[in-house]
Image (cartoon, rainbow, N blue to C red):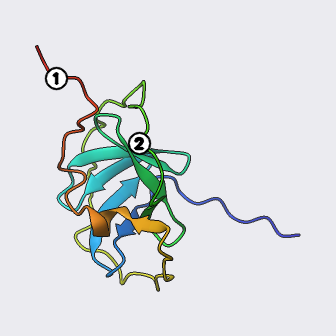
Amino acid sequence: MAKRPEQDPNKPVFIFDTPGDWQATKIGEAIYNTRGDYVGWIEDEDIYKVDGEWVGRLSKDGRILRKRTERRRELHPNPRPAPPKPERMPARAPLPPMMAELNYSIVDVLDEEPDIFKQISDLKPDMD
């Protein structure tokens, strides 16, 4: 059986919403918005915002999905520090892949909450 070639971990992976709009880019384990600002990270398939709030899971077609009934999780105990800004952010994304239809139990996070990476988690304690 032929072995699959390993993909370059620093190759950009584009993240789209269901309508096909480019919303973010994954480079390595970091997630950047389309302007190149660090907005989160990925651990396995789970996506977290910079403050440690869990957002959802990265699907194979490049969307961030979660179950509609999924409960909020505690903040990630070890939020990642912001990595240096990538030297070369893509200026534009390729055409989005064909998106599979979602059933009612699955939510496209970026479609339902387009400003999710702009919001500060209400799970984070208030400053004194």
Using a 10 Å C-alpha cutoff, classify the residue at mark 1 as few (fewer than 14 neighbours), some (14 to 19) or many (20 or more).
few
Residue 28's label in the rendered image is none
Q: Picture coordinates of residue 121 (x, y %)?
A: 24, 38
Q: Nearer the viewer, residue 14 or 118?
A: 118
Q: Residue at x 28, y 72 (%)?
A: 22
In the rendered image, which quarter is residue 85 located in?
top left
Q: Residue at x 50, y 68 (%)?
A: 105
Find disc 2 in the rendering and name its residue.
72
Q: Earlier in the sequence, mark 1 or mark 2?
A: 2
User: What secondary structure is marked by label 2?
Assistant: loop
Residue type beneath disc 2: Arg
CB within 8 Å, label 1 to label 2: no
| Image quarter in which the C terminus is found | top left
Q: Is residue 117 above or below residue 61?
A: above
Q: Picture coordinates of residue 72 (x, y %)?
A: 41, 42
Q: Is residue 11 above or below residue 93?
A: above
Q: Picture coordinates of residue 99 (x, y %)?
A: 46, 82
- Residue 63 seen anywhere in this rendered image of the structure: no
Q: Picture coordinates of residue 15 (x, y %)?
A: 37, 66
Q: Nearer the viewer, residue 49 or 70?
A: 70
Distance between the Cα atoms at labels 1 and 2? 18 Å
Find disc 1 in the rendering and name its residue.
126
